[in-house]
Structures are given as structure tokens and as C-alpha cells.
Amino acid sequence: MEMKKTPNEIRIRGARVHNLKNVDVNIPLHGIVGIAGVSGSGKSSLALGVLYAEGSRRYLEALSTYTRRRMTQAPKAQVDEIAYVPAAIALHQRPGVPGIRSTFGTGTELLNSLRLMFSRLASHRCPNCGHYHAPTLAVAAEKELVCANCGHRFYAPGAEELAFNSGGACRRCGGTGTVMTVDRATLVPDESKTIDEGAVAPWNSLMWSLMTDVCRAMGVRTDVPFSELTPAERAIVFDGPAEKRHILYKAKNSNQAGELDFTYYNAVYTVENALAKVTDEKGMKRVEKFLRQDVCPACGGTRLSDEARAPRLRGIGLDEACRMTLAECVGWVRGVPASLPEEMRPMGESICESFLAASRRLLDLGLGYLALDRAASTLSTGERQRMQLARAVRNRTTGVMYVLDEPSIGLHPANIAGLTGVMDDLVADGNTVVLVDHDTQILSHADHIVEMGPGAGADGGRVIAQGTVGEIERSPASRIGPFLAGKVESRVLPVVPEGELFAQGAIRLSTSEIHTVKPLEVVIPKGRLTVVTGVSGSGKTTLILESLVPALEAAIAGTPLPPHVKNIDASGIEHVKLIDSTPIGANVRSTVATYADIHDELRKIFARTPDARAAGYKAGDFSYNTGRLRCPVCDGTGTVSLDVQFLPDVDIPCPECRGSRYAKPAGRIACTVGNGRSFTLPQVMETDVAHAAELCAGFKSVAPRLATLSDLGLGYLTLGEATPSLSGGEAQRLKLASEMGRRQSDSLFVFDEPTIGLHPLDVRTLLEVFRHLLSAGATLVVIEHDLDMIRNADYIVDLGPGGGADGGRIVATGTPEAVAANKESITGQYLY
């Protein structure tokens, strides 16, 4: 009997998701397939909108309806045919932000193995006398232990009793490691005021105004500036006892007075009392300005109860093991079996191997610098994505398609080898890896590349080149090929002579030790492009986002510097502008047009048309948030949510307005331009920026703003596109729109990895934007891994040499050529 041939590729015919134009393409199975193309060309539409959407949907359809209703399901992709698509798992560019109790240890499941070690292999403390019982197999057998010192019988804690998410949680903080305490610095914000004038802020908003009278009865002068009060008087204001005082109280708005016996609430207790009575978000907002988050005094931030911290293994507790970095903890775990009695070593080796096996890929991916107790909410997007990736490899699946959305985000070139090793392992296990990326280092590792383009938005959505890396390099149609072949000159910006780098002055920052960053003395040239580099965990974020930015903001505002900042000298800098990749807008009502102040101008233009005047419409009527012309079915959101009984709710384009957000009468208000062409506001909002610029060329209030968006490389975005859905790189560039065309000599711009999601051609566009800002006098500081961006720096500050405890110091500074010549710089090794 003849064996049926196993399919070796996915066949896609007629794909029309987003801007895909009836794409026909075959995707090879059982290898690494890179999908390349400029921003907005349709890469994610093909990878996530077609391959992942259909791979996951078809797998879920095999499950029961009861199970499916509890899972988020993608709608059927707009495609004529897709055959031989495996079950799919997507590792998204922006993994969900974890909860307050999630840590690096819980997210990687390493803490499960650690807890098991401390439950089964540790010395356990007698709850009666505190004496420690030596490690024994009786614990694994769930037998009682007998204390040799006092004879008390007790059971050792199970792994679950050592978890801060359940039985092992600190009773004071509930396993979060932090508590809310009163921030005394906020209680009297202006000491030049008297208490009668409202110097004690909580008494103005959280307490009756008569507390001023009670305070006076306590012996405090309320008619002198707070700064002149004696230490004893200040102590009464902040910490005075809750004693009753007889006062004569006169209401502010009447001449009536009366005698009262009233208990004194000091400023601190006023806040604590209000916090205890909070029942809703509104009440919390009134109180939270007087609060700060502090380390829990009961557990010292470890999250664990005293009982969970008690077991001892190799001389330390679980809390101390979690404080180690992953690299340190791996070394410690390797020594655990040898520290045990002979009969326990086989079990110890088995438990320890589960920890070490899970750690290997995390170390390969460059995450060895992270402490196990690091709050997961403080991890970068790239760090969370690599955690996902390591977990995927550990599962040892086969026949699955992994769709990776820009896995190189946040990765230093030195860490790319670990990423490609993980992908090779997935393929070796019989899986397929599809990755959307721009990094030529990672694309060159692909077995096959599909390139989308040629342009973005309406000018993209086609397959322009396909084949091996060598075939793409030789393809005349390919736009990534020249970069893969190394044929493109990296330098775009003019070179500043080394002797002129500091001609416009310098910013000087001096810091003491913080986290794993050593004391630093940093000098940044003004009016230049400074790129801060280093491997993951080397201290870039701490130096710039936790030190330079808050120090400058404090210096400008005249407030105290952060505790770890010793000094900042930045004469002439009056504004600090952080341009990061956080999403813009909280909901779908925020669009590209509203954020860039284009929509308001368009509403005014359409309100002046003869059609609008005849119908009595004003500019406010064209608002899809509140106007009369918004769609009555979806209330101007463009989508409606369907309750499909036993299945998950499904969001679909509004059937009434078809996603335009406007009611039908808005489609009858037309604007005619000079060439005789007419169009409606819903039509303009569905147009991309580049084509809208042509339509609106005659409108002086709109054309320059559209031109700026095009200059920023955002010409492919539609005006009606919801801003929360933009990629990190798109969000950063859109935030820049309002800054273009101004003098910026007193401004410092800080960019946090602005090349996220950018094709090498788009990086060149971004560098042109930087050229405009520099010519306007701005000082630019960029945290970056992208080699093209680094090569265009006027000045580099390279941190390292490693991550975590192995980093945190300045390894090299100077021009790209100087850093490349520095043998201690890991970044320098990849520059030329």
C-alpha cells in the first residue's frame, strides 16, 4: 500500500486580512520562516492575522463548546483557502502585564522547584522550641518529625505552604511584599503657610475643618508659618495623641458658634483613618496622594511568612535563595545534592535537575541577571517575551507552529545567539517557527524568508520576494536584501569631529549605588545624539529612566533630587521629554487623527461646507464621541460586541456604520477641494495619512500636520486607526509629532528603544527625524540595541560588561569608532 505523502508546506490562497491583497503564498513547514517588510507592509497580518488566527481557531474548534466558551477565540480569517496549518501558539510583542504577586520566579515556574527543594530537602524548625531537624526522607513520606531537643511532634511544611500566593504569604502584606504607608512629605506641602491657612493638607480634604481648632487647643500655634513651629509642636501635628479637647467652634459661612468636645486626629492618623474607610475608587483617589508604597516591615519585602522563611537548605532560607540572581541561584542549586545525607541525594538530584533544566534556556536568552524575586510587572516587554519563549521550549511539543512577534525586542546583539538556539531546538523537536522581525542578525538565521511590501498600508500587502537568505540577498525586488548582504552604508547623520562633541556644553550626572548599578559619573554632550548601550540588565534603564530623567525633572521643578542622585548639572535644559513605547489612549475612541489634533480641524472644515450649513450642523456634531452625527448603534466606537450564548463575546465591525463610527447623514456632507474632487469625513478617516495629505493639501490647518506624520514614517496609518493598537515604535513616533518644527535648544529628548518594530529603512527615516531635532538644537539620549542606530551616534555610553551584578558600570564612552576599539566593550565587538 502506497504511503500518503506528508505535507511539507502551508498553502494560503486569497488572504485579505487588513491590507493583504489576495495573497497567495506557501509557507514551508518544519523550519524557521522569517517574515520581513517595512512597517505596515502586512507582516503581522500574514503571521498573526492569517497563520496564527487559523492555526489556533481550528485547534480550538476541535474542543467541546463548553470548553471553548471559556477561552478567547480569534474570528475566522478572511482567506479563501488555507491548508495544512498546524495548531499555533503566538508569543506576542506585548505579553500581558502580570499581577502584583507575580515574580520572575513564578512566571518561569522556577519557584515551584525551589519550594519543593525547601519542603523536601531542607532542615525544618520545630514550632515548639526552634530547634532544627536534620534533612530526612520522612518528609517526602509525609511522616511526622520528632524534635530531638523537646520531643515535640510536627509535620514539615509542604511546597504549597511555602508559596506567597497561598499558605506561605506574609500576614501583614498578604504576599505582595509592600504596604501602603503615609508619606509624611505630602502632609505639609508648603511650610510657609500657617495651620489656619490650611498648611496641613489632610485636614483640608479628609477631615472636618474644626481640627485646626482642636490642634490649637492641643497647644500648637496655628497663626504662625508652619516652618516656625517648635519640634514639640510639629510632633503634636504629625503624631499627637487622640485626646478630647473642649473647643469653641465657629462655622466659616455663618456667625453661629458653639462649644464642642472633640477628639484630636493627628495628620498621620487622619490619612490612616480615611484609608481604612475607603470603599471605592473615588475615595481612594482622595487618599492616595498622601500615601507611598513601602517595603513590608514584617517580611522585609520577601512576601513570605516567618514560617515559610524558616526551613534551611545549605545554610539559607527560601527568601535568601529568591534574592539571588538566576545565575547565582543555578550555582547554589548545583551544590544542594552534595550537602544532603547519602540516602537523600538521588531525590535531591532529581528535584535540582528540574530547576537546572528550566534555567538553561533562560540563561541562554540572557536573563541570568534577573533575581527570582524581581516583580514581574517591572520586567521589560523583551524580558517577558523571552520568559514565554523559554517556557515554550521546555514543554517539548511537536507538530506545533510557533509565531513569534519580533522576538529580538530588547535583545543586545550578544543575546541573539541564545534566541536562535531556542528556535533551533523548537525545530529539532518537529515544530515550525514563524517569526516577524526586522533584525538582520536573526533574519539571516531563517531557513526561508517571505518579504511583504513594497510599501506600507495601501501600498503594501503583497509578497515581493521569497526564498532562502541568499536568494533574498540577490533579489532586485527585495528591500531587506541589501541590508542582509551588508551592502548599505550605516551612517546617515553627519559626523561631528571628536574635538567638537562638547562644544555646546554638557550634562553631568553623579549617582550613588542603586539596584545593581555602581556609583557613576556620567557626562552627556548637549546638542548631540548620545546612545546608551549595553547587554540586557547592564543598567541602562536605571541610569537614564530612574536617574537622569527624574533628576532633571526635580532640578527643573526645584524639588529634592532622587535619594541616589548626588548631583546633576544641566544648565540651559528646561524641558525633559520622555518618548517611550507605552500605548497611546485608553480606548478605541482615541485615534491617530484625534491624537495628532487633525480630527478637530477636519470637523471645523466640514462644518463650514454648504451641505453642513444647510443641515444646521456645527463642528461639535462631527465628533464621534458626543456629536449628533456619530453612529447610534455603536456610539462612535466602530465596533459592537456580540453575546454568542455559550461562546465568548465577539467584537465585530458595526453593521450600521461598517466601522466608520459615523451615522449615514455624515456621508451626505461632502467637502469639495480645488481639483473638483469631493469627499466626506468618514471617507477621510478611512484614508491613510499619505493619501489624506494629498486630499487635504489645500487646508493650511491640516496639511502641515499630515506632512509631519509622513515625515515620521507613519504615512501608512489610517486616520481612524485606534491608537491603543499601535506598535511600540509607532506610538513613539506619533508622540513626536507635536514636537517637530519647534526650537528645542532647551529640551532633552529621551527615547527608550525607538527602533522597536522598525525595518532598517524605517530606522533611516527615524534618523532623519533625529537630524531635524538636532538641527533645532535638541539634546537626544537614546537607549538602544539596534546597531544602525548606535553607529549613527555622536557619543556612546556603554554599560556592562555583563548584566546584573556583572554590570552596572561604564565600560566605554566616546564615538562609535572609539567604543569599537575598546576590547572590554561587548557592544563594540558588533559595531563594525
Image (cartoon, rainbow, N blue to C red):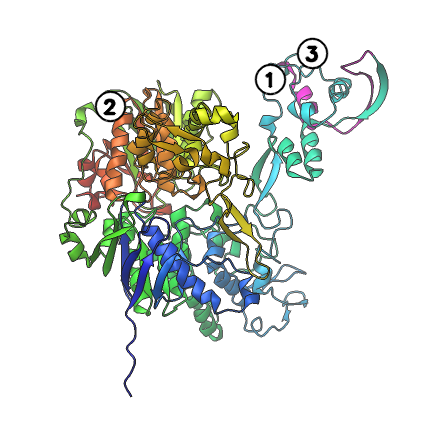
Identify the residue position indicated by label 2 in the image. Answer: 502
Helix or strand or loop: what does disc 2 sit on?
loop
The mark nearer the N terminus, 2 or 1, is 1
Whether residue 394 is visible here, answered yes or no, is: yes
The quadrant in which the C terminus is found is top left
Query: Is 326 left or right of 205, judged from the image as shown?
Result: left
Residue 77 spot, x, y in % from top left: 40, 57
- In terms of image quadrants, where is residue 282? top right
Q: What's the residue at 45%, 36% (across, down)?
A: 667
**3D distance between C-alphas at marks 2 and 1:** 41 Å
Does the CB distance between marks 2 and 1 fall below 8 Å? no
Does the CB distance between marks 2 and 3 fall below 8 Å? no
Give the class, few, some or many, for how many residues have Cα within 10 Å of label 2's Cα (few <14, many ≥20).
some
The quadrant in which the N terminus is found is bottom left
The residue nearer to you, when weighing 211 against 757, is: 757
The mark nearer the N terminus, 3 or 1, is 1
Helix or strand or loop: what does disc 1 sit on?
loop
The mark nearer the N terminus, 2 or 3, is 3
* Labels in figure, total: 3
- In terms of image quadrants, where is residue 252? top right
Whether residue 565 is visible here, answered yes or no, is: no
Identify the residue position indicated by label 1 in the image. Answer: 191
Identify the residue position indicated by label 3 in the image. Answer: 223
| Residue type, mark 2 in image | Phe
Helix or strand or loop: what does disc 3 sit on?
loop
Residue 753 spot, x, y in % from top left: 34, 40
Outermost residue, bottom direction? 1
Please state the extent of the stretch shown in magenta in the rendering: 227-255
| Residue type, mark 3 in image | Asp
Residue 399 spot, x, y in % from top left: 36, 69
Residue 303 belongs to magenta span: no
| Residue type, mark 1 in image | Glu
